[in-house]
Image: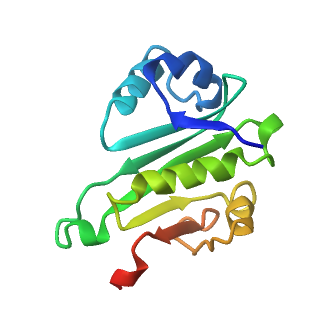
Amino acid sequence: MIFAIRLVQLIDYDDLRPLIDPHDPEPKARQVFARLVGADSWAIIGAYRDDRAVGYVAAQDYGPHLRHGDFHRIVRMHDLIVTESQRGRGAGTQLLNAAIEWARGRARYVEWPAHETRAAPFYTKLGYTGLACPQPDYPTFTVDLHPEQQ
């Protein structure tokens, strides 16, 4: 299934709010959303079906490394959320690919943690390998966008 994949805009907040973890109550959650949607260092990309949000991915460009400049620059994927009713239909794959494409040209690596039973199997199915990290229930996945530079 093909979903409309695009950068999220401020007007999308109410549609996306049910997908965003409600740690921050209103109006703070709306303020954080507005700040991140407007930031050049963030990409919040939505998946839409019939003009309704069914998922999103949020990625942050951490900027140049102090000693290595852009050679080790990292984009961190913070969230990849798809509504349960749309899982298994390709929205997650399209969102992941959109985040990786956004990172290409601005960073060397894209990395993200994923819960070992709830999320990691999805990434493993796509061919990615999670590595152990200090938080054992969350393996870290990394994509090298420029492997020829090793």
61 or 133, nearer to the observer: 61
142 or 104, nearer to the observer: 104
Determine which quarter of the picture holds residue 116: bottom right
Q: Quadrant of the C terminus?
A: bottom left
The reply to whether residue 133 is visible in this rendering is yes
Q: Quadrant of the N terminus?
A: top right
Say above or below: 11 vs 72. Answer: above
Figure coloring = rainbow
x and y percentages locating residue 61 in the rendered image = 34, 51
The residue lying at 82 percent from left, 35 percent from top is 85
x and y percentages locating residue 15 in the rendered image = 61, 20
x and y percentages locating residue 96 in the rendered image = 58, 53
Given the current orientation, which residue lies at the most extreme left position? 67
Q: Is residue 67 left or right of residue 15?
A: left
Say above or below: 147 vs 104. Answer: below
97 or 64, nearer to the observer: 97
The residue lying at 41 percent from left, 55 percent from top is 103
The reply to whether residue 134 is visible in this rendering is no
Say above or below: 141 vs 86. Answer: below
Say above or below: 149 vs 46. Answer: below
The residue lying at 32 percent from left, 57 percent from top is 106
Given the current orientation, which residue lies at the most extreme bottom position? 150
Q: Is residue 54 left or right of residue 62?
A: right
x and y percentages locating residue 69 in the rendered image = 19, 67
